[in-house]
């Protein structure tokens, strides 16, 4: 019986081709990439073992620039593309195509013992930029305000700064923490502290404030009445979506993907949240 001999190099090349997954380059928003992105990528890769996702989070602007330059397949953003970015894409001969995947919000939190229940956006801005340094200024106790913020390594720090401070610098007296959980713990331990956190459930000892009378919950964000919220997008290039990108976007918009979104503290795209969502301030 004659044995069929296949060159070793051909066997290795075939095995390599079978083993090498298709790589999907997802580059963009810190808000997406810091917490939500890894959860979505994990769920997507389980359902699509032949696709590996390379997730990077240099920021929304850097993501759109990478997409326009052909260095990314999807650019997650926490805002719409601006005029300069649209013009840059046009100059490059491509067109940016956005898909809305949901929304996110940031809750302003205080210690449960705080007498403050509601603040106006101007008051929040003044507290976090340092112009208001005493709770008495906003009808609280005559005590210094202890501001808690995220540190420089977290993208959400800049997100809240843009939403609430309109670009103002944080007060120099603010104490920085590595993540939302650390801010929550610090506020729970200090009756004079104020901070911010994502939309996940808050523990005992901390509560979210009403802002302009609006609670920090999914319903208020969905109805676009809560001020510290924005829409999340996945951008691709019109007519140039690779198959892996289409599959990823379909997964994010599916029931499974939207459940991941909600579990991570974001607001799903299509289904209005219950008006009795968690974290409503009393």
Image (cartoon, grey):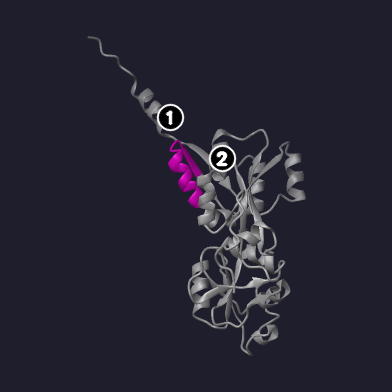
Residue drawn 58% across the image and 58% down it: 274
Can residue 37 be seen from the camera position used here? no
Q: Is residue 164 above or below residue 92?
A: below
Which one is in front, 40 or 92?
A: 40
Estimate the spatial distance between the alpha carbons at disc 2 and disc 1, rounded to whole Å.
Answer: 26 Å
* Residue nearest the viewer, comparing 243 with 251: 251
- Of residue 27 and residue 247, the one placed in the foreground of this image is 247
Residue 94: numbered disc: none
Q: Position of residue 77 (x, y in %)?
A: 64, 51
Instruction: Specify the quadrant that holds the N terminus.
Output: top left
**For this view, does 91 lie left or right of residue 148?**
right
Residue located beneath label 2 in the image: 250
Local packing at callout 1 (Cα closer than 10 Å; few below 14, some 14-19, many 20+) is: few
Quadrant housing the C terminus: bottom right
**Mark 1 residue element:** helix
Magenta stretch holds residue 56: no
Residue annotated with mark 1: 17
Which residue is rendered at x = 62% and y = 73% of the image?
209
**Kind of element beneath mark 2:** helix
Image quadrant in which you'd find residue 168: bottom right
Q: Which residues are magenta?
A: 37-53
């Amino acid at each position: 019986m004659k044995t069929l001999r296949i060159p070793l190099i051909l066997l290795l090349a075939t095995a390599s081709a079978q083993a090498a997954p298709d790589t999907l380059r997802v580059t963009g928003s810190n808000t997406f990439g810091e917490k939500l992105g890894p959860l979505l990528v994990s769920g997507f890769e389980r359902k699509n073992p032949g696709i590996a996702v390379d997730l990077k989070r240099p920021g929304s602007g850097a993501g759109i620039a990478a997409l326009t330059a052909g260095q990314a397949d999807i650019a997650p953003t926490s805002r719409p593309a601006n005029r300069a970015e649209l013009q840059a894409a046009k100059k490059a001969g491509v067109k940016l195509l956005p898909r809305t995947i949901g929304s996110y919000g940031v809750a302003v939190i205080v210690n449960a013992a705080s007498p403050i229940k509601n603040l106006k956006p101007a008051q929040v801005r003044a507290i976090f930029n340092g112009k208001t340094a005493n709770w008495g200024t906003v009808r609280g106790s005559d005590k210094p305000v202890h501001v808690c913020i995220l540190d420089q390594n977290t993208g959400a720090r800049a997100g809240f700064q843009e939403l609430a401070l309109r670009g103002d610098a944080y007060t120099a007296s603010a104490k920085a923490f590595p993540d939302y959980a650390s801010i929550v713990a610090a506020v729970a331990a200090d009756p004079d502290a104020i901070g911010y956190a994502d939309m996940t459930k808050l523990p005992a000892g901390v509560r979210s404030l009403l802002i302009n009378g609006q609670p920090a919950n999914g319903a208020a964000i969905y109805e676009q009445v809560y001020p510290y919220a924005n829409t999340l997008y996945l951008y691709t290039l019109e007519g140039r979506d690779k198959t892996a990108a289409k599959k990823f976007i379909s997964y994010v918009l599916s029931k499974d993907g939207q459940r991941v979104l909600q579990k991570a503290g974001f607001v799903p795209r299509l289904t209005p949240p219950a008006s009795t969502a968690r974290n409503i301030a009393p």
